[in-house]
Amino acid sequence: MQNRLIRIKSLIKKEFLAIFKDPKNRALIIFPPIIQLFVFAHAITLEVRNIDVSVLDYSNTEYSRELISRFYNSKWFRKIQFRSTMKELKSDIDLKNSQLGIIIQNDFAKKINEKTPSEILIITDGRQTNSASIISGYANQIVGLYNSELEKKLNIKKTKINVITRNWFNPNIEYKWFLTVSMIVMLSLVLSLLLSALSIARERELGTFEQLMVSPLNNDEILLAKTVPPLIVAFISSIVITLIVCYLFKVPFSGSILLYLISTIVALLSIVGVGLFISSLAFTQQQAILGVFAFQMPAVLLSGFVSPVEDMPVFFQYLSSLNPLRYYMLIIKGIYFKNMDFVTVFKNLIPLLIIAFITLFIARWSFNKKLN
């Protein structure tokens, strides 16, 4: 029994030495959790702030301006943009320049003076279901307080301002729609990142990396061969997941299938580039997996999946611009829910192409350096 305990103790000691002997392992174990804690604390929030509002005020009277000022002075809202046409307001919400639209009819003041019920229309972006519900609640609260103040000011028992809420792109605020479409992005990230990150590290660990060095293939051909398989596997997987979301979960697909496929390929290429970059730095599969973990969690948090990017501190908003998941999430939801047009899709594909080029270039440079 004593000998067994000694053997177990020796094996445990050996495992600890194996984990902490390599400086890269030590760095990956210590720093990523600390960094992710910092990101978690600032990027995740269930409170929606910094809301941009687009207003279509057909009334343009003292009452309507007073109501709008309540939004302007609220701690939740950041910027009020006045629009003259419904087309401009729709464009703001489509492009996520505004999270809330307010439409006040031209008879708003007249009905208040006549002491009859009046209406305002609130429009939210249903693509972010949790935020849409919270923003709608904020708007109803502000209108309710303003309604109470009008009753005292006009010395009447009841002045009713009815709030009519419209949730664009997800009318019934079905959380399943938001979650399942977001999972297309999440699962594609996991698969493409893991497969590409393990590819070169696996060769080193199995001892076949030297065989690549003496093979007839040049460095670029080897890197291309490492890029294509994870890209194809992840692409097929994302298509299968999309079909399941459409036909099993019955989430309606509104956009162009061709744009969707092209965007998926470009996004996956940028993620594969990140994976190959991680793999080129790792000497073992364990290091590669730790590198994937270090990248994956912050990428998910900064993508807008948990909390809208607009609610994050300014530093993290800028940091998220380096995250391929942010653009992939925006494109997928845009095409899926509202038939995003080619120009808007292309604007979001440009950062993905830049990220893919930079990560693949760095992976190539690192790969060539180690082969030589």
Image (spheres, rainbow, N blue to C red):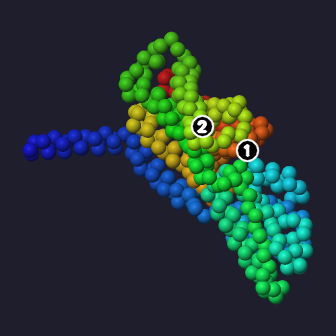
Q: Does any portion of residue 215 appear in the rendered image? A: yes
Instruction: Report which residue position mark 2 lands on.
Output: 247
Kindly identify the residue that appears in the image at 65 percent across and 55 percent down.
173
What is the spatial separation of the Cα atoms under label 2 and label 1, in whole angstroms? Answer: 18 Å
Residue 162: x percent and y percent? Answer: 77, 70
Q: Residues within 10 Å of mark 2 (few under 14, many from 20)?
A: few
Q: Sequence-wise, which precedes: disc 2 or disc 1?
A: 2
Kindly identify the residue that appears in the image at 47 percent across and 43 percent down.
293
User: Given this view, does label 2 or label 1 mark the residue nearer the observer?
Assistant: 2
Residue 255: x percent and y percent? Answer: 72, 38
Quarter occupied by residue 347: top right
* Relative vertical location of residue 278 with respect to residue 49 in this rendering, above or below: above
Q: Does any portion of residue 353 appear in the rendered image? A: no
Kindly identify the residue that appears in the image at 76 percent across and 53 percent down.
93
Residue placed farthest to the top in the image?
A: 216
* Relative vertical location of residue 10 with respect to residue 230 in this rendering, above or below: below
Residue placed farthest to the front in the image?
A: 116
Nearer to me, 187 or 157: 157
Q: Which mark is residue 338?
A: 1
**What amino acid type should be assigned to the residue bearing mark 1?**
Lys
Residue placed farthest to the bottom in the image?
A: 155
Nearer to me, 187 or 49: 187
Q: Which mark is residue 37?
A: none
Residue 117: x percent and y percent? Answer: 82, 74
Quarter occupied by residue 315: bottom right
